[in-house]
Each structure stands twice: as C-alpha cells, then as structure tokens.
Image (cartoon, grey):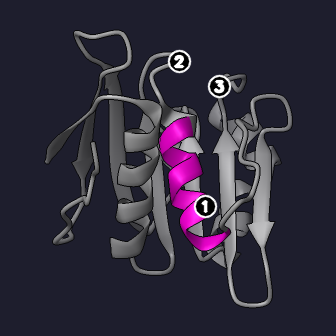
Amino acid sequence: MEYISNNPPQTESIGADYAGMLPRGSIVLLTGDLGAGKTCFSRGFINSYFPGTLVSSPTFTLLNEYKNDQLTILHYDLYRLKTAEEAAELGIEDMISRADYTLIEWPETAEPLIEGNIYRVTVRMGAAEKERIILVEGDFAWKPSVSE
C-alpha cells in the first residue's frame, strides 16, 4: 500500500497508525534516501507506545532502546555498517529475539541475519518539498488515520 504524507506530522501519524497494527515480535525494515523521513516515521511509531519521548536517529550509537516493564522497542540505524559480520558483532539477532518491536533503518547489511515477522517500509521524497511517499509492505489490514 502506498500513502502520501504532506509534512512531518503526517509521516509521524502514519508511523503511529502502523505501530497499532503490528503484532509483538514484528521487525520493521525502513529504507529510503538520506533525509527521506525514516526517523520521522520511526518517531511516530515509538511515540505511539512512549508518548512524548524524544526520538532521534541512532546514527552514531547504532541503537536506541525504548522500554518499560511491559514493552521493549529497538531502533537501529545501520547506515555506517558495511557487512553482515559487523551487524552480527552487535548481537543484533539476540537483541531482536528479545524485543517486542524492532525498527531498522538502513537494514541491508543485517538482512541475512534477520528472521521472523518482517515488514518493509520505504519512504521516498515526493514532488513537493515536504511530500513523502510511504510504501508499506506486510501482511496486515491497516489504514492510516492521517489528518491534514
């Protein structure tokens, strides 16, 4: 399914709606160019479970973990990794197996290691400056409630 977002709040709203449709144990692979909106989408997803939480891209830390007594969300940014071996050294397989939800930006190097309930989100820049085209793939019955 393909959705159009006209601004960052709409992209976050789509991410939040998406979060509500996925079962625990889901792994979301996010692809798109630099600055396309992967982290914005992730922010909406994470804030749907942890409202008001500051969500930034884990580009330098590689992983941000959000958790409480009931839920753990892992947010990876693997942009700087070059090989699957580097992803394996992070213990990504073990971490994913213990998380309720895992979001992975730039997942290409880790894909050989990832198994389970995988969903794909591609974020592309649209014609207008802030327009984004969001393609979601997976087995779910989901409709975003995007407000203008």
- What residue is shown at x 52% (from left), y 53% (from top)? 44
Where is residue 66? Give x, y as percent.
76, 65
Image: magenta residue range: 40-50
CB-based contact (under 8 Å), mark 1 and mark 2: no
Q: Given the image, on which type of amino acid does mark 3 rest? A: Tyr
Q: CA distance from mark 1 to mark 2?
A: 20 Å
Residue bearing mark 3: 79
Q: Earlier in the sequence, mark 2 or mark 3?
A: 2
Say if 111 sits above or below 126 in the image.
below
Q: Choose between 5 and 28: the one closer to the eye.
A: 5
Q: Earlier in the sequence, mark 1 or mark 2?
A: 2
Where is residue 3? Give x, y as percent.
19, 41
- Whether residue 107 is visible: no
Q: Choose between 140 and 46: the one closer to the eye.
A: 46
Q: Given the image, on which type of amino acid does mark 1 rest? A: Asn
> In the visual, does 11 lie left or right of 66?
left
- What residue is shown at x 53% (from left), y 38% (from top)? 40
* Residue 41 in magenta stretch: yes
Residue bearing mark 1: 47
